[in-house]
Image (tube, grey):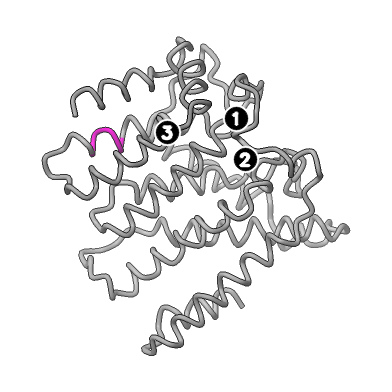
Amino acid sequence: AVRQIYNIFIFSLSSTNQGIAQATLTQIVNSVFDKINVKTPHSERSASTTNVKSLTVDRSSTQTPTSEKPLTLQNLDNLNDEVEKIVDEEQNFSKLQEEINDEQDLIIKDAFLVFRAMAKISAKPLESSLDMRSHAVRSKLLSLHIIHSIIKDHIDVFLSQDLVLPGKDQSSLVDTVRQYLCLSLARNAASPISPVFEITLEIMWLLISNLRSEFKREIPVFLIEIYFPISDLKTSTAHQKRYFLSIVQRLCNDPRTLIEFYLNYDCDSRMPNVVEIIVDYLTRL
């Protein structure tokens, strides 16, 4: 059903049909995530009310052991390939269906499949055409907007570590979608198409403002290897530079985020000095 409605949006020549298809698809996706039952302790949690030490929670996915190489955009892309193989091979959903006896497990699996589909579509490279009316650009924009809507409207789902995808690994939903989301961001963060650049940066802001603990290692990679270099490039548009500056201003206007960034990045010898880079960036401006 999702695929069919998606195709109606992409291939229909009627703007009315396109609008109805987009609204219907958004409702269907939201209904999938609305069904997920998030336990009360997690539903009450938000990034703005977590303890200052929240970023340093002892989780293997967010920690950087001394012997481990720093995360970069290049090895992040390699991790994407590895994780996709693991998910596709070990979590064979046709076989997994037989093992699912609990309705909640089935709902979580549906949510994962929908999110993964949107992330994969959004990560598809554009060919030479940058025409806003082309199927490829419209498809990319729709999938990115749906990803943004999912994270924004269902943040509790991603904050909960109790929601696990059924299978061998029993990984939390946020850990299972991590590499797909990062791949989507990596492929679109430097897009020359203004709407794509904007919505990707808005997704990035959701990670910074709400999921900075869960994406502790990944956030500096995007900031340092993509967004700050874009702000310095002569080939970058004035719009790109202004939009990124507005995100930095949001960050600086959030005292808790700024303090947590300083404590968990600049005060950690294994992590880059993110706040120092921000101060340097603003000073040069």
| Residue segment shown in magenta | 226-230
N-term mark: 1 or 3:
1
Is 194 in the magenta?
A: no
Residue 36: percent from the left, percent from the top?
75, 56
Per the image, the residue denoted by label 2 is 175
Q: Is residue 15 visible?
A: yes
User: Relative to 260, does residue 105 appear above or below in the rendering?
Assistant: below
What amino acid is found at the position of numbered circle 2 in the picture?
Asp
Q: Secondary structure at mark 1?
A: loop
Rate crowding at label 2 as few (under 14), some (14 to 19) or many (20 or more) other CA atoms within 10 Å.
some
Rate crowding at label 3 as few (under 14), some (14 to 19) or many (20 or more) other CA atoms within 10 Å.
some
Q: Residue furthest right?
A: 101
Q: Is residue 74 visible?
A: no
What amino acid is found at the position of numbered circle 3 in the picture?
Leu
Foreground of the two, 70 or 53: 53
Measure the alpha-carbon separation of dots 1 and 3. 23 Å
User: Relative to 123, does residue 280 appear above or below in the rendering?
Assistant: above
Per the image, the residue denoted by label 3 is 251
Residue 62: percent from the left, percent from the top?
57, 27
Image quarter (top left, top right, bottom left or bottom right) of the C terminus:
top left
Per the image, the residue denoted by label 1 is 61
Foreground of the two, 161 or 267: 267
Residue 274: percent from the left, percent from the top?
38, 22
